[in-house]
Image (cartoon, grey):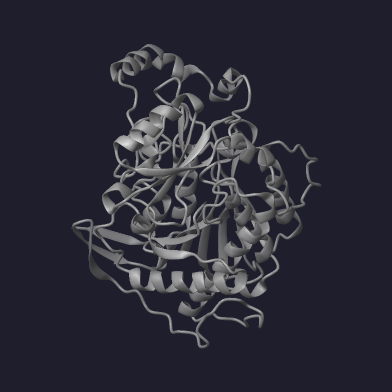
Amino acid sequence: MLHENKCKWCSIVVAAALGIIATQLPIADSNKLLPQMMDYKEWTVLEITLENTEQKNLDILQLENQDIRPMGSPSTPYVSRIAVSPKKLKEVKKELNDHRLSFKILTTDLSRELLPTVAASREELAHGSSTYDRYMTFKEMENHIDALSTHLPNKVKHKVKGKTLEGHDIHLVTVSDYTIDEDKSVIFVEGGIHAREWISPAAAMNLIDHLVESPALTKHIEWHIMPVVNPDGYVYSKSWDRLWRKNRSGTWFFFCTGVDLNRNFGFHWAGDGASTNPCKQNYAGESQFSEKESKAVRDAVLEVKDRIEAYVTFHSYGQYIMYPWGHTVKTQHENHESLDKVGQAMAKAILTAEGKRYKVGPAGKVLYVASGASDDWVANVTGAPYIYTIELRDDGSYGFILPETKIQAGVNDAWVAMQVIAKEVMDQSNLRTTIPEDDPADLPAEPKKRRRRGCKGKIHNGKKRKRCRRTKNKDYVINH
C-alpha cells in the first residue's frame, strides 16, 4: 500500500482548527475556491497487475490522495488502474517496485483523454427532447422527465423524492400502464449514484424512453426509476472535475468534500471496502444514511418494498453483471443459483444482441468487497428475488471516459438486460404477455408458475429470521 501523509497528527490538528469553519461554509460556495477546472495535464495512468487473491482484495481506493486517483478495474482479472500527478509519479513507481507489483503506463497525459468529454459547449436540447449522441446535462434530463409526465400521464408519473445540498431535485420516475388498476410488481432501477459514471444516467433515461413505447413490459409491471441519484456530483463532474465520484457534502475535514453514496446505506455500513477517512473516494459518511441522496433512495424503496421483485443499479465500467453479496466473499446469497441463472441469461442476451461479453457473479468476488452499498441493503430489507449491479461499458479501453460515440451501444446493453429481467418477473408472476418476435432475450418458451413465498425461518446474519412476504398490508420481520 502506498504511504499516506507521514505526519498524520498534522491533519488532525488542522481538522480540529478548521472543523467549525467546515461546518459553516456552504458547499455551493466552495466551488468559488477552485481557480479552474481540474484538467489532469501530464497525469500518468498506470495499470497495476495484482499477482494473487490477497493483493486483489487490497482496496485500491485506499491508494488515493490528492495526487493519486483510482481509475477502477477493467474486465481483466487482478488488474487495477490509478492516475498519478507528475509530482508524485516517481514516488508511486518506487512504491510499486518495492512491493513487487508489476505495472505498465497507459498514458502520460490524462488530459488528452478527458478533453473530448469536457471541452464541447453545445446548445441545450429543445425542452422535452433527449439524445444519446452525447451526454445530456442534468437540466436536459429534468426537462425530458417533465415533458414525458406532462404529455403521457397514463404512462409516466414523476415525483421529487428529495433535494440535495446544492438544491438539485432527486427525481423518481414511474412508468406503467396506469389505465390498469392493480397492485403491480415493481422493478426498481437507480442510476448516477457515482458522478463520473456518465453512461449510468444515460442508460436509465434510455430505459424510460423505451418503456413508454413497450406496452408488453408495462401492462403488469410498475417501473420505478431514479435516473440521477447524485445530481450534485454529476453537475460537478461536468463542470469542474471529470473524475469526481462522490456527492458534494461537506465533511469534518475542511479540505475534503463528498461522501461515496454507494457506501452510505445501512447494511454493514463502514465495513470492508469502505473508508472512514473523508479524503478517500470510498468515504462512507459520518453515519449510515447520513446523506440526502441515500435517504431519498431508501424512502423510495421502502414505499414499495412489498412489491419489489427486482432491483438494478447501473454503474460503470468493466462489463459485469453482479449480484449480492458485495460486503463479503464468505457467504453466498440464499438465492444465488437463481440470481446467477438470470444474470447469465442477461449476459447471453447482450452477447447475442450487442456482441459484448459481460462477466456474471457475486459482487464481492467478481469485483471487490464493498460494504454499505445500495444493492446489498435492498436485498436485505426487501427480500426481492432479483438484485443486480450492472457495470456497463466498456471493458477498460476507455474506462470512465466512455466516448460519446459509444453511448448508444452502452445504453443498448442495459435495455437488453432489463428486458430479460422484466420477462423473468412476468414469468414468475405468470403475467407473460406477447413477446415481440425480434426480442433478443433468450428466455424459456413457457411461463413458469409463480413460486409462493410463505413464512419460513431463515438464518440471517447469525440470527434466525422469520419473514412473511407478500402480505396485503405489511411485511412482518421477526428477529429472535
Q: Is residue 432 visible?
A: yes
Q: Is residue 239 left or right of residue 22?
A: right
Rendered residue at 34%/22% (across/down): 5
Above or below residue 176? Residue 404 is above
Is 161 in front, or is 45? 45
Above or below residue 110? Residue 33 is above
Q: Residue furthest bottom?
A: 446
Residue 448 percent location from the top left of the image: 45, 84
Residue 13 percent location from the top left of the image: 32, 13
Above or below residue 255? Residue 349 is below
Is 49 in front, or is 80? 49
Q: Is residue 308 visible?
A: no
Total numbered labels placed on residues in the image: 0
Is 144 in front, or is 438? 438
Residue 191 percent location from the top left of the image: 55, 51
Q: Residue furthest top?
A: 17
Above or below residue 68? Residue 359 is below
Quarter of the picture holding the N terminus: top left
Quarter of the picture holding the C terminus: bottom left
Question: In the figure, residue 381 lies in which quadrant?
Answer: bottom left
Residue 411 percent location from the top left of the image: 62, 59
Question: In the figure, residue 455 lies in which quadrant?
Answer: bottom left
